[in-house]
Every structure is written in structure tokens, then in C-alpha cells.
Image: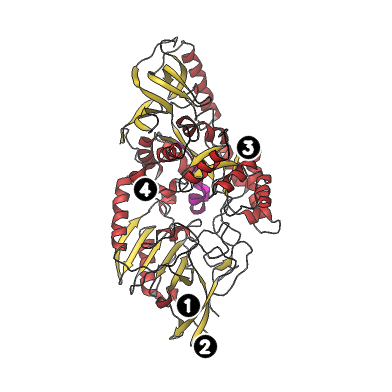
Amino acid sequence: MTSSKAETDVRRDLIDVALGRAPADLLLRVGRLLDTTTALWRDDVEIAIARGRIAYVGARGSFPGKADHIEDRPHLSAVPGFGEVHKHIESSHITPEYEAALVIPHGNTWTCEASHEFSNVVPDRTLDFWLAARNVGSPLKIFPLPGSAVPPTAWEHGAHLDGTDQTRFLSESLMCAGLDEVMDWPAVRDRDNPAHDRLWSMIAATWDARAVVEGHAAGIRDLPGINAFAASGIASDHEAWTAEEAFAKLQAGLFLEIRIHTGPEIIAGLLERGLTDWSQVALATDDRPASEVLQSGATDRNVRMAIDAGLAPEVAIQLVTINPARHMRLTPWVGAIAPGRFADIVLLSDVVTLDIAEVWTDGKQASRGTEYLLPIPQIDWPDWARETVNIGRKLTEADFVIPAAANRETMQAAVLRPFHWTDDFLTYELPVDGGQVQRDPARNITKFSIIDRYSGKASVSKMFWLGCGPRDDDTALCCSMAHDKHNIWCVGSSDAAMATAVNACADMQGGWVLVHRGKVVARVAYEIAGLMTARPAQALHADMQALYAAGAQVDWMYEPSFHPRWTEGFPERLAFATLTCSPWRWNLVAPSDHAPEGLVQVQTGQTHPVVW
């Protein structure tokens, strides 16, 4: 469905098959079928499939034509392939061809890809990347939504997308579904914000194409704020944390996308409030690493959560089929087992427990139980996807030094902690030694840095952070996944260890590097855009387990923060601590003309020295 002409040719052929004028490729007979448009079951149904699409659905024996092949599954119940209304495939950290092999056995056959991660790295290649796997035969349907947060705020530089780019994306392929989550609410709301015109140009371009503008209303919980967000025309939110917040946003007309971490509370709370029409609700994965999918599931896990929280199985299934398809205006292709749609069918041996027996994609059996059956296309990803880390030179420990003013024994320092959502930074007095401001491990204060990996200028911002780094000597952790700009972040107990870690990360074009007591002890390659690896999920999982094992040997500083998922041990969630969207205030970004030291209040643009 990359073009209207190709789509027209397919539809003409489907008409002939439905009328019996041309044979079907396959006739699949099932014991019963869930009609997601009504949430009712149909017994003894046959599905005629041609060209990877559904041509006919009716009672057993009613198909007027012939089929080249017949498959009978009288003991199984058929539901449509599950869809992701909002997911960053980048968070799986495997490329789309391997994502297909990972999630299809869990029933996930289509994904609305929220692409502000990849878009921030290689903006002009957004559609080229997300459509590449499907173009060479991958069965996973990826509907890209180019990033709105490129750059994430007006105070960050580098990649740039605006309304002209969005118009081009939406005209290039029918697969392009809209605009990815609008995260910079201050820029949308405030006319004097430097990003205001850029963001509104993207929103307007999306409306011109009758496409969907997705939202990100994190921290917006007051009634005036919720009303203003809904009045903007942004269509959805996936950031509700409580049932009260979710219900208020639903009443304001927003499409509600529920994530698993807050799902049980929200679903139970909506049921308690008497919600009977769930058509404005979907289940969203958002971010989920491949290791987590291997251990606990993909979209199927979300559905089981909803059933356990009190939803009828039929309604829970609607939340990952017809509801997201309607919201994303994709019903001609996905969301139901109905004529014209892709022949993506999940066959269940037990509906209540969502026990998946088989998954069919494009009219072919793709999995049996958890076993993926189809070949994985081999993609030779080009340099524009592989060569994305350009620091410019090898860094040295001098690049991470924070100099003190002359003749000072102490300096005042601005200090942040992960997920620091207060209006001002913390202030500590730190010692000076050899003309350099020093860490203070006794108070859980270490050094945190952002390295510009795009410009080739070896630009490094650095400051002091609280409760998140290694206490061991000469130890550092760095990663090229740093939501949402994806410059390299590094936290360390010595400047030399930080330089070693970042140089190793750059050498392999992105990923994780852990240096312990001066030696590189673990690394995980994300050689594609510094975000993903072109390997099976199981191979990535093995590397991540080795990283965790090495990390378990490190003494990590810890203090609680505002985020409930900020926990002790290996600080993996530092990858999310560099977000600059609401509700963040002060944060560290790569050096720029606006913020040479990188410390900036990302809602107002105010800057401040890191020491004084």
C-alpha cells in the first residue's frame, strides 16, 4: 500500500475473488471469529485470502469461488492481528526485520512507529528506514509517524523537521499515518517560544493530509491545561498516570492510550467510573526493550493486563485492533478480519487467557506458538543508517574537566538528579583541587556529561549530578541512546574513564560501554543509528545480560527521585533522564550558541553556569 495505484490494483483483484470470478489463494476455516466492529463472535467462518489480503468472510461453505489451498482450524478462535497505536521500535533496539520475528509470535502484526528517536538521528531518511524491511518482504506492517520533536526543544540544535518535510513525508507513502507525539507543549502553547512556528507548521501540514496529530501530555493534569491541550487539535495522550487524569483527558475528547505500568489502575478506575464505551481507548507499548519482550510478551501482554484489570476479552482485544485502527484512520487495512484488510490473523486456543496457537500474516502462517516460521530478510543497511556517530576526534580526560575560578578552594555548583522535575536545580558547594571542581562521592555527587555526536566538533557539556553514578574509582557508563536527541551521555567517577567509555562507544558507532576501574568490561553495539542493532533479539539479549552482569560488580550511587521506576543498581533509566519535553525543567543538553555550557531550562530557555 505504498501508493494509491498499487492499492487500486489489489482492490480490483479482491473484488473478482469475492464474487467468485477469480480463485482465492487460500481458504482459512476457523471455529469462530471475533468481529471487532461489533465485539460479537461468528461461528464456523471461512476467510478467503488473495494477494495477502482478505477478500471474503462468511459462514462455512458460503464462499462462491474456488481456492488453491484450504486450511481448517475448527478448534481455534480467530481475532485480527494486534496493532501498536504508539510504539518506538527503537526501544526494542533491533532493526525492523528482527522486530518482526520478535513480536509477530505475540500477535503483533502492525505498528504505528513513533519515530522521533530515529528522526532525530537521520531526519531526511525517516520513511526510507521504516519502510525498508517491508519493501523486501518483512510481514510486519510499520506505519511511520515522523517526529515532531526534531529538535526536541528550541534550545537544542542539529536535526530539523518542519511543515515542508511533513508534507513531503505524507505524500510519499500511504503508510505514513501522521505526526509523532507532540512533546514540546510550551512551544505549542506559547506564541513567543522559538519553536512555536515550526511545530504549528508540522501540525498544519498533517491536517492538510487529513492525518493524525499524536500527543504527549505529560504533567498536564489541571483542567485548564487539559482543555487547552485538547483545544489545540492534538488528538491523543499516552502519558496519563492515574485513573482520575485518564478520565479527565477522555472527557476532554482525547484518545486515551494506556501503557502497561499504569494500566491496571487506570482500567479499574475507568470501570469504577462507569465507562461503557471504550472506543476512544487503546493499549500502548511505547518503550519496551527486546529482552523484556522475550521475557514477558509484546502486545499480548498488554491485552492480558487489560483482561486481568476487569475488561471483557472482546473489549480488551478491541483496544489493540479496531480502536487504534480507527484512531489512526487505518481501517481500510487493519483492525478487523474483514474484506480488503491485510490477512493478518491471530488464532487463539483460549480467548480468556489469550493463548496464541498460530499467527498468520499476509495470508501465510508466520508462527506456531512462540516459534517464528518465516525467513528474515537480510538488509545491507547503508552508511546513512550505520555511520551516525561523528564526534570529530578522540576525547581526552581534559574534555570532561570543569575548571574552577582562580584562587578558589570551593565553587558553587548547579546539581541535577535523574527526573528532576522541580522549578530550580539543586546547589552544592564542591571542593576545588588543581584548579578543577571535584566530585563529592561522600554526598553521592558525580559528573554527568552530554557529548554532541553529530557535528564533529568534539563538543562536550558536563555538570554534577546527584545519586546516579559509579562510586568505584575510574569507572564510567555511557550510551548513545539518550532520549530524545540521542547525543551520547556519560556518567563517571573519573574524567579519564569517561573519555575511555565515550571513545569506545564512538568506535562501534553507538551502543553501551561500561568501563570499570579503567578497563572496558562490557559493550553492546547499536550500530544502526546508534539506537538499534541488526541482529536477532536473542543475540542482543545475551549482550545485555553480559552488560548487566558486569554492572552488578560496580558500586552505584543511589538516591530516590520523582520517578517511581528510578531504582537502585545499574542505572539503565539514565537513557530517559535526558528528555527535554514536559514536565522537565532544567536539564543538560549538548553545547550550543544559546547554551554554551549546556545547562538550560527547557521550558523557558533560561541558561545558567554549571559552577560559579
In the rendered image, the vertical position of residue 109 relative to residue 114, given as above or below: above
Q: How many marks?
A: 4
Which x, y percent locates residue 605? 62, 65
User: Would you call the spot at circle 2 few (<14 residues within 10 Å), some (14-19), or many (20 or more)?
Assistant: few
Question: Does residue 154 show up magenta in the picture?
Answer: no
**Which residue is found at the position 36% from the left and 29% from the top?**
350
| Residue 526 rendering spot, x and y as whole percentages | 38, 54
Q: Please tell me whether residue 448 is drawn above or below residue 37 in the rendered image.
A: below
Q: Is residue 160 above or below residue 267?
A: below
Do the residues under discs 2 and 1 have CB atoms within 8 angstroms? Answer: no
Residue 562 rendering spot, x and y as whole percentages: 50, 61
Label 3 to label 2: alpha-carbon separation = 59 Å
Mark on residue 406? 2
Mark 3 or mark 2: whose residue is earlier in sequence: 3
Q: What is the secondary structure assignment of the residue under circle 4? A: helix
Residue 197 visible to an observer of this rendering: no
- First in sequence, mark 4 or 1: give its number: 4
Q: Which mark is residue 292?
A: 4
User: Can residue 118 be found in the magenta stretch?
Assistant: yes
- Position of residue 327 measured from the top left corner of the image (x, y, whole percent): 57, 36
- The residue carrying pointer 3 sits among few (fewer than 14), some (14 to 19) or many (20 or more) residues within 10 Å by Cα, namely some
Q: Closer to us: mark 4 or mark 1? A: 4
